[in-house]
Structure formats: structure tokens, C-alpha cells
Amino acid sequence: MLKNKNILLSAVLLPAAMAFAQQNGGMWIPTELNEKEMKDLGMKISAKQIFDPTKPSIKDAVVQFDGGCTAEIISPKGLILTNHHCGYDNIQSHSTVENDLLTNGFWAKNPSEELPNPGVTVDFISDIKEVTAQVLAGTNGLDQKAAQEIINKNIEEVKASLKPESWQRILIKPVYYGNKYYAYIIETYKDIRLVGAPPQSIGKFGSDTDNWVWPRHTGDFSMFRIYADKNNRPAEYSKDNIPYKPKYFLPISIKDKQENDFTFVYGFPGRTTEYLPSIAIEKIMNDTDPARIAVREIALKTLDEKMRTDAETRIKYASKYASVANYWKKWMGEVEGLKKSNALENKRLYEQSLAAKSPELKNSLDELKRLYTEQAPYALNNAYYTELLRNAETLNLANRFLNYSASLEQGKMDDKVLAKFKNELSAFYKDYSGELDAKVTAKLLALYANKVPAQYLPEGFKQNFSDANKNLETIENWSINSIISGRNSLNGATVYTNIDNVFANQNQLVSIIKKDPLISLMASLKEAYLKNADSKYTMLQSQIDAIQKKYMAQLMQADQNRKFFPDANSTMRVTYGKVKGSNPRDGVFYKFQTHLAGVMEKYLPGDYEFDVPKKLIDLYNKKDFGIYKDKTGDVPVAFTATNHTTGGNSGSPALDAYGNLIGLNFDRQWEGTMSDINYDQKYSRNIMVDTKYILFVIDKFADSKWLLNEMKIVK
Ligand code: ARG
Ligand code: GLU
């Protein structure tokens, strides 16, 4: 009897325990890993080996790359690997029409050829501490505003009490909407040099057509090196700096992979919202995502026409275009995935079941529903306005000049602030074409006039700007005569030829700016938006935030069986799962792996997305694969797994059961991109470039054996 009961129990419990893995996804704080489950899934190392503040551990090889991506150290000389699309800006900035590193790739032949990238940083996390009790001390019973003041004060005290070294800083961040706080001790290195990058026909193969899509064949990697001062500490760029000596670096495995192998991904995921109420998901799905998609659709189409026919424009806009296109496509996948995974329905049922148990939770949900519904029209306007300002770059410029003239008039413009402004402008103008953007701006103004209700718009705007063709004429006319577009001069100079001359007499400049119709238009759009929409939007948002914090706590209280993880917030996390294919649609099975043969299948000679470099074709035809082929005889290119990743995980190391590097995370598959809101084990897969392909390209394609010699390769 007892025996039978045991069997029955394990039959019930075991699948449940197994199913917990990735059932609801999970991005775990590395000091709070589910070691037992990771081991049950096949992990052969301990949680301590993944994160140990006192001894070298894997975390010492994982860095945040330039604030947005992840990178990992793969040699004792500070060599790091990240995605090609993460290094893209830097590769672009070293490129000209004559020496186009994007097209040709770049491989330093020795350290002296490595290229510095001023401004680029990498962050190490030397420790993580939970500091909730200290941060929230004395806030009980206070209203939101009073509590926040105490929290801010407490945060400063906690920072001081942690006594960072002179080369460290402390960052304290909330999770669970302010129900918990963590402190991060960070060391930032500032001399980061470009070591190698494949041509974009490898590193960005498939470009926007294949972006967010499986099966994938992109060699999305680039290499940099961290430099340090002679004490191995962070230092500004200097030719006297030396390669950083890491506490730990990752061995690289080129063993064959099997479906269901354990794997984990270590990195800096940016932002997820897994605990939104169903009403918020509904608004994202039906209102704000479609609005953002519509704006970008127009901008991208207009840029693309020019970029295809003009090499200079292509280089100038390459990085910006890729980043606008990236989320444009992501949002489309997200909306589809939310529908397909039944996110709304499932969330509603879940909410109902919890509300039945907890009247307080039900109250919060009702409040959230009321607030989100009231906020919806303002949120929609906010989506259109922020996308307009991002994509209509001439308006974006106009806004910067507006802020500048306001600062000047308020006496806030000293030499330092001015120098900073001019630097920002110069960086902006480097990748801007006034003529091309006049078209984008004209078309987006028409969309804005047509989509946004008149009560949120300036007087007469709807009548005057709803016709795109008319706008094209008006805006071109304004742009060609404007100083800010760089198409007109002041004191014999333009912002391109001599920006100092343009700013020589600031009073004169401001009086000209004030008469510029682009600036006046921007001023009126902004005024109408701030007054009619933004004030309501932010007021309601702060009420939503306060209830969401309460709701989060109630949720954790009401659903004790659920294993909660904090939403991504650009801090260090570990996610784990299995190497796995998927069955995204009826009759369709995705294998977990692609090979070089698939690159050749997609090859379109001369195409801007699917061309293949001749040398790679030759290697393929000669089957010159060296030690990088797998048991099929071909080189594996990319693979998928159930790791729960998001933007910011780009470049993150994918590791095997022993902590060896097996791939570089760079994307998710289309059917699962809603995982930022609703991870679904059936559809959600992360996409990684295989270490075999990376090493194959470095070795056979780039002949850069000197780099391989630095690495520790596990065969
Ligand atoms: N979708 C990936 C990520 O979110 C890759 C983006 C870069 N590639 C591109 N074609 N835009 O970053
Ligand atoms: N490509 C993304 C990035 O740049 C990672 C993919 C994702 O969003 O999952 O971080």
C-alpha cells in the first residue's frame, strides 16, 4: 500500500517538478540559483562555481558590454566575444566607403593592430547583495512620495556602508516593482579595442529578413579586448595600457551537441514584464504595439529605398536602421505570439482563480483595470509621440535645439554644457542626412496627424499636416533653408563644415532658431502633447506603479506554489534549460541545429542580405572544415534551446553542464518573442551561434590562429 502510494506520489510529483524547469521561464539572480533543479536537469558544476564573490568563478568572465549587451572573456589576455550586432556601431564607426569594415570584416594580425573605441565600456559585477531591509527601513505606512524620499536616503546610506574601492561603484536596483532591492558592486573598464569581426555577409547574414526567425544561419559574433593599467585596474584609453588579466575565462567546447543537453545562459537581460495584469497585455497587444509598428514601417521603407541605391547612405544609416527594424519586427512577433499562446485568456483565468482566494488582490486588479482603461488614449498618444520623435530625426534635432535655446535663455548654458551639446550634435550629424530625413519626417507627420485625435494636437495641425504629399513639399522647403538640418549656413559655415562658427554668436543663433518653422512646429507639437496627454499619462502611470507594487506582493502571497523570479532589469542573471527544437505549428518541426549547408541553401549572389563571401563558399566546396565539423560531416552554425532570454542577452555565453562555452546567444525565434510578457515553453526558444562556427570562421576563414592560441579549447 505504502509502496504503491509512493509510486503514485512520485508519478504526480516528478512530472510537476520536471515541468517546473522553464515552465514559466525564469531569469535568476546568480546568488539565488535553483541549484537542485539545475543539477536534476544535468548540470555538473555547483552554484558556487557560477557565482562566488570570494573565489574566481564563471561570473568573473561575464561582462555587460557597453551598457546594452553581454560579452564573455575567452582568454587569459582579456579577449572577449560578443555579437556582431553588439559591436556593430564600433565596426561602423571605423568604416568608410573606401575602407568598409562592415562589408570586408576586420581581423587584427597582432595586438598593435587592435582598434580603440573611445566611450565603449565593459562592466564586471564583483558582488551582489540583497539590501531590501535597509532600503525599505522606516517606510512602513508612508504614502508613496514620503516613502520614496526615505528610500532615496536609505540607498545613499547603503551605498556608503558598502565602502566601494576607488575603482568600483555601487548600483542599487529594485525588483518586483519595489518589493525587493539588490546592490551591485561594479567595476567598469574603459579601454576596449576591436580585435576581429567577420564581414556582415557572415556576421549579419540574413539581416532583417531572418532576424527573429529560425532556422538561422548568422555568424553573429565579434571580438574585442579589454585593456587595463599596469595594476590591472580600469583606465582611460592609453597606448601604454596592457591586456587585462581576468580572474577567470571560459574554456570553449567544440564537442557535438545533443537535443536535451543541459545549458545555461549568463548575462544582462534588459527588460521583461512577466507580471502585468491582463488589462495591460490587452492594451499592448491592441494599441501600443500596433502604433509603434505603424510608425516604424513608414520610416524604414523610406530609408530603405535610399540605402539600397547609395553606398554612403547605407553606411551612415546601417546601425540606426538595424536598430529601428529590430523592434519593429519584434513587436509584430510579440503580438502574434501573445495571440497564439492565448496569453490574454490564460492570464484572465489565472487572475480569476487568485481573485477568488484574495479579496485584496481582486481589489488591486479592479483598480488596475480602471486605471489602464483611463490611461489608454494617453498611452496611445505617448506611443505615437515617442516613436515620432525617435524616427522623424529632423524633429528630434528640432527638439534638441529647443531645449538648448531654453537653457541659454535660463542662463544654464556654460562652456561645458555647450561643448557637450556640440559633441552630441556632431555625433548625430555624422549619421544623418537632412535631405533623406525630410521625407521621413514629412510622412510621419501625416501619420501622426491622421492617427492622433485632434484634442491632443496643436490647433490646425490635423488640417495642415494630414496629407503626406503636401508635407513632402513643405518639410523639404523648410529643411533646405534650415541651419539645424545642416543644409543652410550661418557665418559662412554649416553644422557639418564648422559647428563652432555656427555657435559663435549664441544670441544670433537663438534668434534664427526661433524663426525656423521646423522648430516652431516641434514646439507646438511638444506643448500640445505635454499639456493634453503626457501630464495625464504620467499621473496615471504613477498610480498604476503604486498599485502594481501592491499587486505584486499580493500575487506572491496568493500563489505560494509558483516559483517567482524578478523581471529583467539589466542586471546580471542566469537562465537555464535544454538544447531543444520545437513544434511551432501543426505539421512543422524545427530541428535544434543548423549547418553550413543551410548557409549555401540561402545564398543569393549579390543580394544585400544573403550574399556569401567567396572564401566561405570555397571552404564549403572543399569541405575544409578542420576540427569544427560534427558527426554529420558539416559545420554546425546555430542552435536553439529553452533558455528564457531577452534583449541585453545578446552576446551572452551559452554554457554546457560543465561551464564550457558552447554558443553565443543572439536572438529568439519568431513564435516565442512574446516571452518578455508571456514565456511559453512550447514556443519560446533562444537562438545561439555555435562555438564550432565561431572558431571555424576565426581559424579557416580569417586565418587568425594567433587568437585561437590564446584560447582554451575543449575537444
Ligand atoms: N533580434 C536580435 C536582437 O534583438 C538581433 C538584432 C540585430 N540584427 C538585425 N538584423 N537588426 O538584438
Ligand atoms: N538580439 C537581442 C539583443 O540584442 C537578444 C535577443 C532577444 O531579445 O532575446 O539583446
Image (cartoon, grey):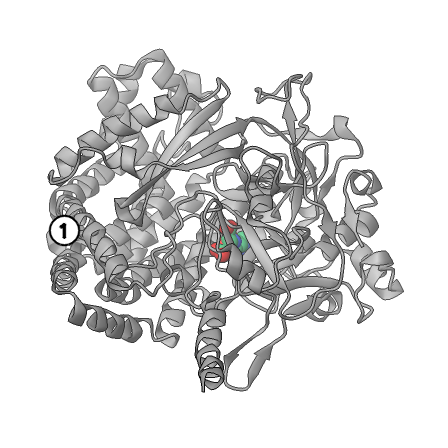
- The residue at the point 33 percent across, 27 percent down is 158
Give 380 or 502, whichever is nearer the viewer.
380
* Type of the residue with mark 1: Tyr
| Residue 150, image x, y percentages | 19, 30
Give the answer, above or below, for where 485 lies relative to 629: above
For label 1, the SS is helix
Q: Is 154 above or below relative to 272?
A: above
User: In terms of depth relative to the viewer, which is nearer, 11 or 468?
Assistant: 11
- Report which residue position mark 1 lands on: 456
Q: Tell me which residue sits at (69%, 41%) in the image.
A: 74
Q: Does 616 sit left or right of 271 as displayed? A: right
For residue 606, which quarter of the picture? bottom right
- Work out which quarter of the rendered image holds the N terminus and state it: bottom left
Can residue 305 be seen at all in this image of the molecule?
no
The residue that appears at 27% across and 67% down in the rendered structure is 286
Q: In this view, does 691 lie to the left or right of 17?
A: right
From the viewer's perspective, tell me whether residue 71 is left or right of residue 514.
right
Residue at the (33%, 57%) spot, across then down:
292
Look at the numbered disc 1 and say if its residue's Cβ is closer than 8 Å to ligand 1: no
Quick one: label 1, few (<14), some, or many (20+) residues within 10 Å? some
